[in-house]
């Protein structure tokens, strides 16, 4: 057996173990093997692009976890996650847009009053 054959077998086994660990953590998780090109580009497999709703020119968010794992999300997924996290801090039934408009109108009224006094 050559060193390259050993390396391929080890790589294949490591990929198998990684794939096995992905299943129990998330029943909807899939692992795909891809390559880093010389230019630094990574090809996102077509099944992943379809699942994320990505097409040519789509924006993606790339995040490096503390563990070193690379996470790629569509922009819409990232925005949805942020909105979900923010909702925890907004009391039920409160409309922040309406509150912002009310505050801005009150501020504009104060500015108008100050301008008339000057």
Image (tube, grey):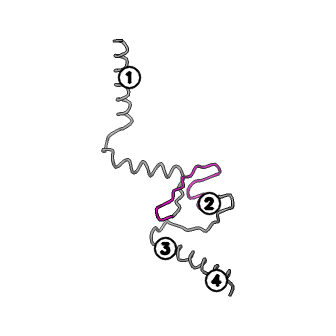
Relative to 76, residue 111 above or below: above
x, y (%) of residue 15?
57, 74
Residue at 65% of width from left, 51% of height from top? 56
Relative to 118, residue 52 above or below: below
Q: CA distance from mark 3 to mark 1?
A: 57 Å
Number of other residues with Cα within 10 Å of mark 2, as a class: few under 14, some 14 to 19, many 20 or more: some
* Mark 4–mark 1 CB contact (< 8 Å): no
* Mark 4–mark 2 CB contact (< 8 Å): no
Residue at 37% of width from left, 25% of height from top? 105
Q: Which comes sooner in the sequence, label 3 or label 1?
A: 3
Q: CA distance from mark 4 to mark 2?
A: 28 Å
Give the camera-side residue of 26 and 9. 9
* Mark 2–mark 3 CB contact (< 8 Å): no
Is residue 13 covered in magenta?
no
Which region shows up in magenta? 46-68
Q: Which mark is residue 77?
A: none
Relative to 75, residue 95 above or below: above
Q: Which residue is mark 4?
A: 6
To which quarter of the image does residue 12 belong? bottom right
Q: Which residue is mark 2?
A: 44
Q: Which comes sooner in the sequence, label 2 or label 3?
A: 3
Q: Which residue is mark 1?
A: 108
Give the camera-side residue of 108 and 55. 108
Is residue 57 covered in magenta?
yes
Residue at 63% of width from left, 79% of height from top? 7
x, y (%) of residue 89?
33, 47
Number of other residues with Cα within 10 Å of mark 4, as a class: few under 14, some 14 to 19, many 20 or more: few
Q: Which comes sooner in the sequence, label 4 or label 1?
A: 4
């Amino acid at each position: 057996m050559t060193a390259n054959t050993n390396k391929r077998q080890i790589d294949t086994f490591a990929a198998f173990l990684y794939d096995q660990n992905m299943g129990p953590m998330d029943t909807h998780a899939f692992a795909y093997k891809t390559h880093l090109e010389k230019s630094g580009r990574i090809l996102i497999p077509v099944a992943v692009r379809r699942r994320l709703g990505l097409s040519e020119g789509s924006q993606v968010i790339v995040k490096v976890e503390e563990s070193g794992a690379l996470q790629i999300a569509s922009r819409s997924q990232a925005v949805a996650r942020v909105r979900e996290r923010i909702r925890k801090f907004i009391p039920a039934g409160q409309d922040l847009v309406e509150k912002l408009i009310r505050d801005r109108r009150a501020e504009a009224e104060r500015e108008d009053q100050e301008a008339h006094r000057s």
